[in-house]
Image: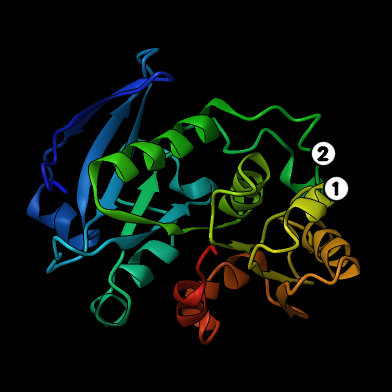
Amino acid sequence: MTNNPIKKTVSLLFAAVFISTGASSAEKAKAAGEARVFQTAGAATMPYRLFVPAGLKDDQAYPIVLCFHGAKGRGTENLASGSLAYPVLTSAEMQKKHPAYVVAPQCPMGKKWVNHIWTEGAYDSEAVAISDEMTTALSIVDALVKEFSIDTSRIYVTGRSMGGFATWDAIARRPDFFAAAVPIAGGGDPKRAVEWVNLPIWTVASAGDRTCPVSGTRVVVEALKKLDSKIKYTEDPEKSHGVICNAWEDVEGLGDWLFSQRKP
């Protein structure tokens, strides 16, 4: 295992370069972790923030959580903006109980993790091609698994709003890759339910959401329940989109549940 913040990784699929970016003391105070930039073989780049747990032991592997931000988190400032999961998961309290790597890629302005109209709810992942942004985000995780001592049986994904759609999309593109998923206020593809029967999922949505309608979550939950999946679903009857997106702060036990999941 290495803690070198600048590392070049080459594989048959892509070559990546990690560039550590400078940050002011004010920026560091806003977001824990290191600001990095991922570069693909095609020269495309994506900023991402990486939190490395303290006190790493050479003989131990650690879980990693991929956090997708919402629409307001798009840009280049690389402060994990728009991801409420990131500050919760990197907090001293959470890290004391569950030391883990946490990574938050940043989508460019004007782009989406999933090329779908959010107000339409659920979507067909066969008709909607995987976005370049999703491909890059997943490639970042692949590269981090090679760079650090990461427990590949405990790779998790979560996100809210645009990131909620991204969470459903990530497990659609890689149904056997993640150990658990927490999509919040998003929408997925119910036809993929058969691939997720054994994947631990805790999803959160609200009937009062006018931005990402609850139907986008309900239809997937219903498909999973028909297959006797152990899907966990928390639905609020009236919270607005902005309020339900606070699930990582408001839903009790979410972190403990996530980190208890492990691929067989």
- Name which residue type carries label 1: Lys
Mark 2 lies on residue:
124
Residue 196 image point, x, y percent: 72, 57
Q: Identify the residue at the far top of this view.
A: 42
Residue 89 image point, x, y percent: 36, 69
Residue under the image location 33 percent in, 45 percent down: 145
How was the colour assigned to the protein in this rendering? rainbow
Q: Height in image: 148 above or below 196?
A: above
Q: Secondary structure at mark 1?
A: helix
In this rendered view, identify the residue nearer to me: 137 or 151. 151
Packing grade of label 1 (10 A; few <14, some 14-19, many >=20) is some
Q: Earlier in the sequence, mark 1 or mark 2?
A: 2
- Name which residue type carries label 2: Asp
Q: The C terminus appears in which quarter of the rendering? A: bottom right
* Viewer can see residue 121: no
Left or right of 20 on screen, residue 111: right
In this rendered view, identify the residue nearer to me: 13 or 106. 13
* Viewer can see residue 51: yes
Q: Height in image: 162 above or below 43?
A: below
Residue 172 image point, x, y percent: 68, 44
| Distance in Å between CA atoms under marks 1 and 2 | 8 Å
Picture disc at residue 191 = 1
